[in-house]
Amino acid sequence: MAVGVPRPAALEGALRRWGIRASWLALLVVLPFAPVASQVPPAVRYAPFVASVVVFGFPHGALDHLVFDRMDRLSLPRSLALVGIAYAVLGGLYTGWWFLAPVSAFAFFILLTLAHWGQGDLYALLAFAEAEHLPTRAERALTVVVRGGLPMLVPLVSHPTEYRRVAAALVGLFAPADAVLAGLFTTTVQWGVGVGFALVTLTALTLGRYRVRLGADRRAWRVDAGETLLLWVYFLAVPPVVGIGLYFCFWHATRHLARLALIDGAEGGARERLASGDLGGALRRVARDATPMTLGGLVIVAGLYLAVPRQATGFEGLLALYLVGIAVLTLPHVAVVTWMDVRQGVW
């Protein structure tokens, strides 16, 4: 499937409803509670990440083994072998990096997640919103930076103390962290990131508006601008643990699952069920397909729990361990998604 190819009207409506608008609602529901989010008990603050184990977040990457089977008609064993090798090699190398140099491994995780979450939103804009204001690779790359930077950089500006605490918890599983991270969380860095990223955001939206003046679809640019504004407000207001946990489940993961539904063209597959309005059936199929690899990913997290030099304790320590596990699995996942981007004409 190329980006923006014609689709039945019913499927088009389902993709916009569940691939885009549902994520708006999820974040808008949370925003009014932002002032009290940091005061709720830890069990509540960490609940979105706990839920992400089974609710969209962790499972959305557990379908990678089916991508080559469904897109290039490779046999399932060959698809499994190809993805398995990618996960073993890339995930294994990145795991070693965490043990040898956890500070730079954490910095890479932030940049990797920024690129990945940005590429997810770029695809959604092109395929679900049919954006015409991003015609060049440079403009699309700028959109990746903006969309990925919103969850990764804005919380550093608005909630630096909590951001630093989470960073210290991840690095602290492998080595003492406070002294090393101190120079990264200064007022100068905070203001530099805030002002610099605001200018990048304005540049991207201004270029998009210029494309509209040249004839690009105004509606899609408004979706882009509106989502960008919503995410700026959301990540300025909502503390990172709550905000990123909910974003992971109900924004990034749901959009990727909608993308995967489009390549599930088998009879009774997710694409057919979405087109017929059977969202429950589509989700049941996703759950069935994702369960084996989700369990495999949790085994990796359990292995990390036994292997890290410093024991993970309490909500913060266990979250840190979970995030390192996600980091290790994200690198090969990004490789698969990047291949999808190239194959589907994003670049």
Image (cartoon, grey):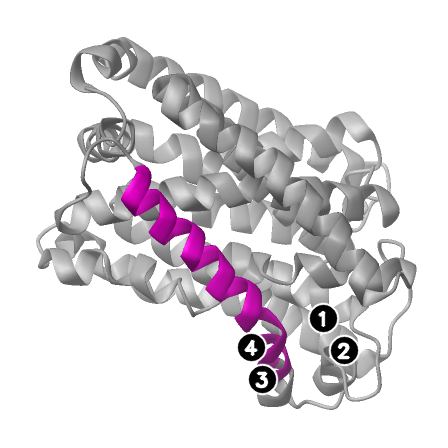
Q: In this view, does 36 lie to the left or right of 300?
A: left
Residue at the image position 61 percent from the left and 34 percent from the top: 90
Under mark 4, the amino acid is Ala
- The quadrant of the rendering that contains the N terminus is bottom right
Q: In this view, does 59 lie to the left or right of 162?
A: right
User: Which residue does the numbered mark 4 point to in the structure image?
Assistant: 287
Residues 129 and 271: in front is 271
Q: Do the residues labelled 2 and 1 touch (CB within 8 Å)?
A: yes
Q: Do the residues labelled 3 and 4 touch (CB within 8 Å)?
A: yes
The residues colored magenta run 283-307
User: Which residue does the numbered mark 2 point to in the structure image?
Assistant: 271
Nearer mark to the viewer, of 2 and 3: 3
* Pointer 1 or 4: first along the chain: 1
Q: In this view, does 39 lie to the left or right of 291?
A: left
Tell me the SS state at disc 1.
helix
Tell me the SS state at disc 2.
helix
Q: In this view, does 332 lie above or below 247?
A: above
Predominant SS of the magenta segment? helix
Give the CA separation, mark 1 to mark 4. Answer: 12 Å
* Pointer 1 or 3: first along the chain: 1
User: Which residue does the numbered mark 3 point to in the structure image?
Assistant: 284
Residues 143 and 107: in front is 107
Residue at the image position 75 percent from the left and 53 percent from the top: 81
User: Which residue does the numbered mark 1 point to in the structure image?
Assistant: 261
Under mark 3, the amino acid is Arg
10 Å crowding of disc 1: few (<14), some (14-19), many (20+): many
Give the CA separation, mark 4 to mark 2. Answer: 15 Å
Q: In this view, does 190 lie above or below 288?
A: above
- The quadrant of the rendering that contains the C terminus is top right
Q: In which quarter of the image is residue 47?
A: bottom left
* Pointer 2 or 1: first along the chain: 1
